[in-house]
């Protein structure tokens, strides 16, 4: 199925957003085995990656558009499961954009354990955004949940880094950042 021009532009914008916000090196992506967790029913990053010649990628989500699920070019690149249940192996890069860190019903310790178990040595799990705030209680509570869940990972097997995002201000004057979480298997 040929991708219309307007859709190609949208996919290119989505690819750029992922690369920038997740701080990915597009040159290295072709050589990596990649999973996009919570890729969404449109699987835009997966489709954009395929358009960019990145063949070793899968998108994971609990539902996909019917036309995508039946597309012969995409069928081997889509996994219909949730982050807590998908079994990944030998992954170099697992990304989660606007899914794991913000989803209210996800079992974070189980999800982190499940996803990191699928990483190769030096493989990375990158999650964006993980928000932080000194004043917003809901954001503080969610950030603490993420930090606590990370403590359930086997000690000494992973390096954990929060890359601070640019400070943003709400109309109320309260400030927050959208940070990038990088978990690297040692």
Image (tube, rainbow, N blue to C red):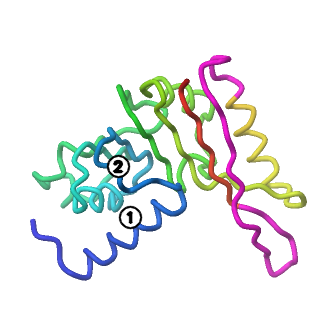
- Judged left or right of residue 104, residue 30 is left
Going by the image, does 70 lie left or right of 161? left
Please check the rendered image and state whether residue 169 is part of the magenta-colored stretch, yes or no: yes
x then y, percent, for residue 146: 70, 39
The structure residue drawn at horizontal position 42% and vertical position 40%, both measured from the top left corner, is 93
Q: Earlier in the sequence, mark 2 or mark 1?
A: 1
Give the residue at mark 1: 15
In space, the residues marked 2 and 1 are separated at their CA atoms by: 12 Å
**What stretch of residues is rendered in magenta?**
151-177
Tell me which residue sits at (22%, 47%) in the image: 55
Work out whether 186 lies above or below 56: above
Q: Secondary structure at mark 2?
A: helix
The residue labelled by disc 2 is: 29
Apparent side of residue 46 relative to residue 103 in the rendered image (left or right) = left
> Pointer 1: residues within 10 angstroms few (<14), some, or many (20+)?
many
Q: Residue at x 33, y 57 (%)?
A: 43
| Front label number (2 vs 1) | 2
Q: Quadrant of residue 26?
A: bottom left
Find out whether residue 48 is within the magenta segment: no
């Amino acid at each position: 199925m040929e991708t219309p021009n307007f859709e190609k532009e949208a996919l290119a914008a989505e690819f750029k957003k992922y690369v920038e916000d997740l701080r990915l090196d597009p040159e290295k992506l072709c050589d990596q085995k990649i999973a996009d967790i919570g890729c969404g029913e449109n699987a835009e990053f997966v489709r954009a990656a395929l358009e960019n010649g990145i063949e070793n990628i899968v998108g994971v989500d609990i539902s996909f558009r019917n036309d995508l699920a039946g597309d012969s070019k995409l069928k081997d690149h889509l996994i219909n499961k949730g982050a807590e249940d998908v079994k990944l192996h030998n992954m170099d890069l697992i990304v989660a954009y606007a899914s794991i860190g913000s989803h209210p019903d996800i079992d974070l310790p189980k999800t982190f354990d499940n996803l990191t178990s699928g990483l190769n040595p030096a493989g990375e799990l990158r999650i964006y955004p993980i928000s932080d705030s000194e004043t917003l209680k809901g954001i503080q509570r969610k950030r603490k949940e993420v930090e606590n869940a990370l403590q359930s990972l086997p000690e000494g097997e992973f390096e954990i880094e929060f890359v601070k995002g640019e400070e943003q201000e709400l109309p109320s004057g309260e400030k927050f950042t959208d940070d990038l979480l990088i978990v690297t298997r040692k």
